[in-house]
Image (spheres, rainbow, N blue to C red):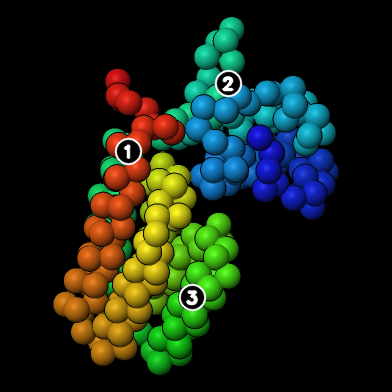
Amino acid sequence: MNAGIGAEALARVAVERPTQKAEQIYELLRHSIVRLHMVPGSVISEKELCLQYGVSRTPVREALKRLAEEDLVDVFPHSGTYVSKISFDVAEEGFVIRRALEIESIRRAVRFVTDADVARLDALIADMRDILAREALHEYIEVDDAFHSAIAGISHYPRIWKFINMVKAHLDRMRQLSAPVPGHLAEVTEQHASIVRALARRNADQAELAMKIHLESSFAVMSAMYEEGRYFKRKDV
């Protein structure tokens, strides 16, 4: 259940004040859930979390309450607490919001992009290719997010990425599931390169089209995961 949570992070939680502890625990658990270190359907034990973080039940319950509000945790009174299964409907909603904001972001980025920005994006693509060469697919999503966050920064609307992060948790879990699909991340990497080429040419229409193709084709691959059904809610009520 607790894979991916480092000793350093746990030590920080132990010395924080109650509200800070709740925030730290929330961030650590959210990261573990989104990155599938804690798989959908797995049991969450409040007692184990209290022992692990060296805290009382109050900050743990506050963190779990926030995760439940994001549909990342299911709390059943007198029954138990579980990592929620992935909601396709929520993931699709996150995709629609992300696509709208990123298309706006990329068009604005064309107005402000510099050669140094292009070089920074190219360096991130080089990191992606290195990850693929090493077959360290679990590292890819972090660099992918850094790439898109950088574009938001170039657009001079850096908070766009913060808003996207708020709505893409279920989408990110689908991204993790789709990572091992043969050839998928290699194609994603080349799509990123196409986006950068359009930015370098300062062509807003090409940049928008490249971003749209990238996001929609990636979501199509992720959507195929839904048919397998293992980690998904079969019906949203």
For mark 3, does the 10 Å Cα neighbourhood hold few (<14), some (14 to 19), or many (20 or more) residues?
some
Q: Where, quadrant-wise, is the C terminus in this rendering? A: top left
Q: Is residue 84 above or below residue 94?
A: above
Q: Residue at x 58, y 46 (%)?
A: 31
Q: Residue at x 50, y 32 (%)?
A: 40
Residue topped by disc 1: 226
Res. 81 mark: 2
Say whether residue 19 is left or right of residue 213: right
> Distance of mark 2 from mark 3, alpha carbons?
39 Å
Q: Secondary structure at mark 3?
A: helix
Residue topped by disc 3: 129
Q: Residue at x 60, y 43 (%)?
A: 37
x, y (%) of residue 185?
Answer: 41, 64
Q: Is residue 212 above or below residue 35?
A: below
- Closer to the camera, 169 or 161? 169
> Distance of mark 2 from mark 1, alpha carbons?
23 Å
Looking at the picture, which amino acid does disc 3 mark?
A: Arg
Quick one: which residue is furthest to the left in this view?
A: 205
Q: Closer to us: mark 2 or mark 1?
A: 1
Q: Quadrant of residue 43?
A: top right
Looking at the picture, which amino acid does disc 1 mark?
A: Tyr
Labels 2 and 1: the sequence-earlier one: 2
Looking at the picture, which amino acid does disc 2 mark?
A: Thr
Q: Is residue 112 visible?
A: no
